[in-house]
Amino acid sequence: MSLALYKKKRSFNKTPEPEGGKKSKSKSLKFVVQKHDATNLHYDFRLEMEGVLKSWAVPKGPSMNPEDKRLAMMVEDHPYDYRNFEGTIPAGNYGAGTVMVWDEGVYDAMEHEDEPVKTQEKILLGELKKGDVKIVLHGEKLKGAFALVKMKGRGENAWLLIKKKDSESSKTDVTKKDRSVKTKRTLHQIAEAEGGEVKKRTPVKKRNSQPVLLNEQDPAPVKKKSLKTKS
Ligand code: MN
């Protein structure tokens, strides 16, 4: 696997992001989810495979609810040491904005948890090729079984990140937990400390909210019947 695209997009004398090169020596596969306040706020979901991080940008972030199917756009492989990156990518650079390590931990190939890491990696790479990756996450926020499923007929990069039903699935919005697992800081605090732009965002509309029709928003005032006090 190549980091050529990753390197091509970045000038390492201008960004604090790692250039890469350090290979994993761990006995378990690692995953990280980074909250990235770029042009559009998103979560970068990364799985260690073959010494690099396979990466997907998830606009709405992960969900613990099996009913949610979260769009996950596959992006270029990132270096293994990127999983520790928290800070600010300066303006003018690719992906400019503040990055938080939102969740991290180890993960397994689902139903192959007892196999050696090398075997699990091989299975995962096969699943990746087929467009159906089944994993079990052991993070601080994300736990249990998940699937990454490639969407058919939606171009090369569109996948869905879906929680599978298990004892960890839940309807509670996990993105409400909005602090770094590394430093306990909020995005705002990281931006302030690392010289990033502190953005004020309007809250994202709820998924199920109905669009408001302008002419229904301002109905003609209903005349209230005057309350006659009984004498
Ligand atoms: Mn990103």
Image (tube, helix red, strand yellow):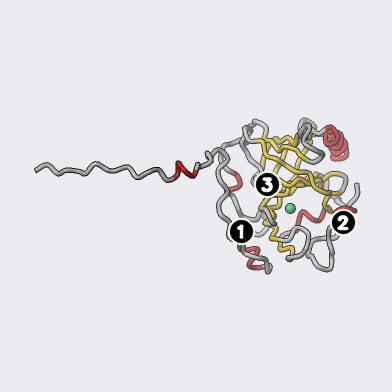
Residue annotated with mark 3:
59
Is the CB atom of the residue marked by disc 3 within 8 angstroms of ligand 1's nearest atom? no
Identify the mark at residue 186; answer none if there is no mark.
1
In terms of depth relative to the viewer, which is nearer, 42 or 49? 42
Residue annotated with mark 2:
22
Q: Amino acid at mark 2?
A: Lys
Which residue is pictured at 73% across the width and 35% down the height? 147
Residue 157, how many percent across, how many down? 79, 41
Separation of marks 1 and 3 at Cα, in angstroms: 18 Å
2 or 1: tag closer to the N-terminus: 2
Q: Amino acid at mark 1?
A: Thr
Q: Is residue 108 visible?
A: yes
- Disc 1 residue crowd, few under 14, some 14–19, many 20+, Cα 10 Å: some
**Side (left or right) of 228 relative to 1:** left
Separation of marks 2 and 1 at Cα, in angstroms: 28 Å
Report the number of discs: 3
Q: Is residue 113 visible?
A: no
Which residue is pictured at 45% across the width and 41% down the height? 216
Residue 215, how many percent across, how many down? 46, 43
Question: Which secondary structure lies at badge 2?
Answer: loop
- Location of residue 70 (image quadrant): top right
